Amino acid sequence: MHVTSGDNRSGAHGRNRATAAATAVAIAATGLILVAPTATAATPAKAAAVPTAAAAGADLPFTSVEAENATTDGTAIGPDYTQGTVASEASGRRAVQLAAGQSVEFTLPGAANAVNVSYNVPDGQTGSLAVYANGQDTGKKIALTSKYSYIDTGNIVGSKTHHFFDDSRALLGRDLAAGDKVKLVASSTVTVDVADFEQVAPAADAPAGAVSVTDHGADPTGQADSTQAFTAAINAAKGGTVWIPPGDYQVSGPLPVDDVTLLGAGNWYSVVHSSHFIDQGSAPTGRVGLKNFAVIGEVTERDDASPDNFVNGSLGPDSTVSGMWVQHEKVGLWLTGDNDNLVVRDNRILDTTADGVNLNGNAHNVQVSDNFLRNQGDDSLAMWSLNAPDTGSTFSGNTISQPNLANGIAIYGGTDIGVKDNLIQDTNALGSGIAISNQKFADPFFPLSGTITVSGNTLVRTGAVNPNWGHPMGALRVDAYDSDIDATVNITDTTFTDSPYSAFEFVSGGGTGKQVRNVTVDGATVDGAGTVVVQAETPGAATVSDVKATGVGDSGIYNCPFPQGSGTFTLTQGTGNSGWDTVWNDCSAWPQPK
């Protein structure tokens, strides 16, 4: 989880079997073409087959192709589930390493004129990938750098150097069809994980009546700072639209926005370079629109005392963020104050050193949907009910891939919250695919209350070993970390694929034996679990029905509340369960993944 200036919320998810530590953090991730790795000594066992598509997740404008499924003369790496390795942070836990002159060639699944590549280069190095189409050199080169990778967060106990991957994109200058070939040739050592192929529409035209930033002196070449020009255009367009023509713009300071829409020609064309784009305590009118442009920062480390975010604070009520490409910020949107009825949809948030989106208390009826998030250095999507409860807000239909130091989706307190129809893939360390938690981090905190609805989510290779606990975290975790779960938690229609450890986990992460109760699980498919289906570690109760499991590593149930003597966890099995009726019977040891 991300920490704002003045807060001390970050820490290790702290508990082992012998002692209870004090603090915590979380983790998870997604991808598009899903791949089943082969089990190795460092890789928990997996089911034999993985679907190539899922009903959950965002409706995306691109299609991803894994490098390990392409043609290459390079070296395949992975699968690996070891924290602190390049392969363990890759989608599918596999990738392709190229030496200078080696290549990986993709067959296009559909029409495309653009590509975005997720890659890693050795620390301190740069390079490029030359792009060939159907055997011809396009003249395009994809720039590679380690500048935004290799992050260390010493304040988070148990973390290692992480955040190995980055994204780099290029317009190809030609239209290609399904079945065409795109080859990437390395100038130096590079690990290619996945390529996103997209048919990008032509740049849009300015709408009638819009106020252009260039008319107020903005420099589309990026040579001069355009902060004053953007501010002047915003002031002139009050109640209307600010137009950002195609170009690259430098904005060095935060912009004031209220009752105005900032609109670009498309997020491949209108690009703003800013590490601190919007930072305001309130926008009294609200009705802010941020649409169809890119904001790319220069954040190379995580400084929790710095507001290096795309949006920091409040946009005001009835605002919309859509069609944005946000990259190389600390946080995408760190939302405090009045953001009532905010809609965040159809955005790409990539390569942040901390959270993707965090509703940081007092968020009412915020809808975050159809977004793609990759390579977050903390929770990809989070609600944290600090100072006031988040209420009536929902994360729905998002695709999350490879957060590398926290959960895919985390709900820390709040009232009447929804987590629906999301696709989450490849958590790496210190977290779960989804966490429903009463971990407070700071006060005043408002625990879970009302009804928490978790429905229709797909979790692929999620869950990870917590080095501070000395054992794993499940793919979907309900955590009475600092206080008993008193909310009604309804978990329905979940799909688990290749969970490296357990599917469901019920725990008090602080090690104090708080109760997880009022939980109903109704409908789940578990296709591969490395250890157990249900991991119960604290007192409380849950009713579980219609959960069908195959490929379970050891036993169906681990039920060992901690600390010893704190109480019992009552697991009531309803109808329709199958494949997980055995029980782990040695509470002095943990089942090992198979």
Image (cartoon, rainbow, N blue to C red):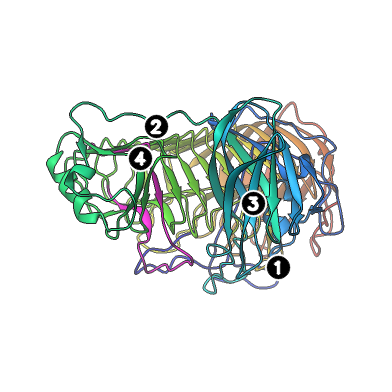
Q: CA distance from mark 1 to mark 3?
A: 47 Å
The amino acid type of the residue labelled 2 equals Ala
Of the image marks 1 and 2, the number of the one nearer the N terminus = 1
Residue 248 lies in the magenta-colored region: no
Q: CA distance from mark 4 to mark 1?
A: 57 Å
From the image, tell me which residue sits under label 3: 129
Where residue 313 appears, x then y in whole percent?
30, 53
Are the residues tagged 4 and 2 within 8 Å (C-beta)? Answer: yes
Question: Circle 2 — which element?
Answer: loop
Instruction: Using the image, tell me which numbered label, if any, was put on residue 203.
Output: 2
The residue carrying pointer 3 sits among few (fewer than 14), some (14 to 19) or many (20 or more) residues within 10 Å by Cα, namely many
The residue carrying pointer 1 sits among few (fewer than 14), some (14 to 19) or many (20 or more) residues within 10 Å by Cα, namely some
Question: Circle 4 — which element?
Answer: loop
Are the residues tagged 1 and 2 within 8 Å (C-beta)? Answer: no
The answer to whether residue 374 is visible is no
Q: What residue lies at 74% left-to-right and 31% top-to-bottom?
A: 51
Eye-nearest disc, 1 or 3: 3
Are the residues tagged 1 and 3 within 8 Å (C-beta)? Answer: no
Q: Could you tell whether 323 is left or right of 262 in the image?
A: right
Q: CA distance from mark 1 to mark 2?
A: 57 Å
Are the residues tagged 4 and 1 within 8 Å (C-beta)? Answer: no
Q: In the rendered structure, which segment of residues is drawn in magenta?
A: 287-314
The amino acid type of the residue labelled 1 equals Arg
From the image, tell me which residue sits under label 4: 246
Where residue 331 appears, x then y in whole percent?
43, 55
User: Observer-nearest residue: 177 or 70?
Assistant: 177
Of the image marks 3 and 2, the number of the one nearer the N terminus = 3
Residue 294 lies in the magenta-colored region: yes
The amino acid type of the residue labelled 3 equals Leu
User: Observer-nearest residue: 118 or 410?
Assistant: 118
Of the image marks 1 and 3, the number of the one nearer the N terminus = 1
Instruction: Using the image, tell me which numbered label, if any, was put on residue 17.
Output: 1
